[in-house]
Amino acid sequence: MALIKVDFISESLMRTVTINAIVPVDKLSMPGMPVREKKPFKTLYLLHGIFGNYTDWVTGTRIQAWAQERNLVVIMPSGENKFYVDNPLSGDMFSQFIGKELVQVTRDLFPLSDKREDTFIAGLSMGGYGALINGLRFHETFSHIGALSSGLILDRVLHSTNDEVMPTNRRSYYESIFGDLDQLIGSEKDYKALITKLKKEKADLPKIYMACGTEDFLLEANRDYHEFLVDNQVDVTYVEGPGAHTWEFWDTYIYKVLEWLPLENSSEGVHSGNVGKK
């Protein structure tokens, strides 16, 4: 399994950015084991939560081993606490970066499929919000969206004040991310408005997988969005399970996301964790 750190200049963000890429090009097969046909890889763009960066998924879960088993490339960028949305005032065009530039750059770098049915996006918490927003905005690129413990917090944002102890919960912080909060509902940063817009346009919506822990503070918001998707006849799989807003939950459910995605059959190959297997 090749774990590759890449630095490149982003036109969307106007600075050098760093990503991690899991690329299973070095899988070893013993005699008698099936050899994968040489063809472009399916790809999952995987977004972290607030306070995290491009290393989170590799250090917090077993995504590296599971991607190898399924011959899946996983691309992990940094979101810099910016919710993966565009902000023209600050020049942080994260939505353009995630939905367009990152896809194009990684396809130029690695042997990735350019087919919609082979291209997926997922994330946790802030990254779950980012996966939903950008998976819907760029629905012609992404066929499946995985959203774990998603930060569906627009109601909190709209009613926020500057009295919060945590700086990232203050109204001024949200304004620095989302811009004029009076314009937020109905915008391209509104996960319900995007569904309404795309349904009206009769667009081919991505399939959605949502999961949230029964002890998660975001549970009610995720339940509400699930009900909204069902009411709008969106193809959604929704799961709840024991757990809070923790890596233990996300490690369990990113595996379930991989089981849900249309990936290749699992074949481990040879690596340091299974050299003794018969």
Image (tube, rainbow, N blue to C red):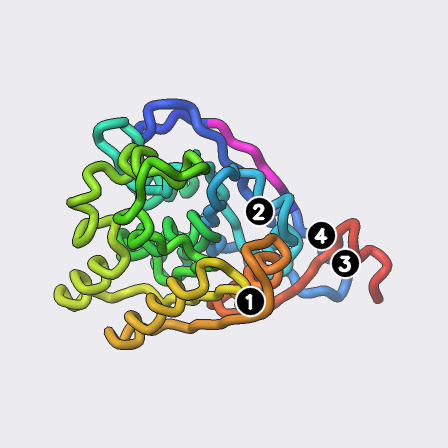
Q: Secondary structure at mark 3?
A: loop
Please name which of the two marks, 2 or 4, marks the residue nearer to the observer: 2
Numbered circle sitting on residue 256 = 1
Magenta-colored span: 3-7
Q: Quadrant of residue 83?
A: top left
Amino acid found under the numbered disc labelled 4: Leu
Q: Position of residue 168 (x, y in %)?
A: 41, 37
Give 177 or 53, whichever is nearer the viewer.
177
273 with respect to 74 (left or right): right
What separation in Å lies between label 1 and label 3 (alpha carbons)? 28 Å
Outermost residue toward the front in this view:
163
CB atoms of marks 4 and 3 within 8 Å? yes
Horizontally, residue 125 falls left or right of residue 20, namely: left
Q: Residue at x 25, y 34 (%)?
A: 87
Q: Is residue 190 above or below residue 172?
A: below
Amino acid type assigned to the residue bearing label 2 in the image: Trp
Residue 30's label in the rendered image is: 3
Counting residues from the N terminus, which is met first, the one under dot 2 or under dot 4? 4
Q: Are marks 1 and 3 in contact (CB under 8 Å)?
A: no
Return the mark for residue 28. Answer: 4
Neighbour tally class for label 1: few under 14, some 14-19, many 20 plus, Cα within 10 Å: some
Disc 2 secondary structure class: helix
* C-alpha gap between disc 2 and disc 1: 15 Å
Is residue 132 in view from this perspective? yes
Amino acid type, residue under disc 1 in the picture: Lys
Is 239 left or right of 105, judged from the image as shown?
right
Quadrant into which the C terminus falls: bottom right
Q: Which residue is mark 2?
A: 57
Number of callouts: 4
Depth check, mark 1 against mark 3: the one in front is 1
